[in-house]
Image (tube, rainbow, N blue to C red):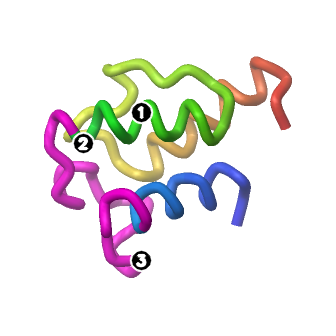
Amino acid sequence: MSAIDSAIHSVLTGKFEVAQDHIRPEATLESLDLDSLALAELALALQEELGVEVHEHEATKSTTVGELTATLAAKRTAAGVL
């Protein structure tokens, strides 16, 4: 599991109490019961954890875990954060 996968899983299970088996690449953030406030908190937590900015449009209700992972991986690569 990559650092990004670990961070996403850690935040979702720890802060939002999402069951580990529900966190799949095809799962949308809405299907994980994250509302608008939770999405903002998720973005902030991931920014702190990974050291890259997460914009509102990158973590929406329709965003999948896989899409979020890919977006964060690209941002970390572009920023030179490994």
- Residue on which the image places disc 1: 43
Percent position of residue 17, x then y:
31, 68
At horizontal 38% and vertical 41% (from top left) the residue drawn is 42
Disc 3 element: helix
**CA distance separating discs 2 and 3:** 17 Å
Q: Is residue 53 left or right of residue 77?
A: left
Q: Which mark is residue 64?
A: none
Disc 1 element: helix
Percent position of residue 6, x then y:
62, 61
| Residue type at the position of mark 2 | Ala
Q: Quadrant of residue 44?
A: top left
| Residue type at the position of mark 1 | Ala
Q: Assign the magenta stretch its main secondary structure.
A: loop
Q: Residues within 10 Å of mark 2 (few under 14, many from 20)?
A: some
Q: Which mark is residue 38?
A: 2
Highlighted magenta segment, given as a residue range = 14-37
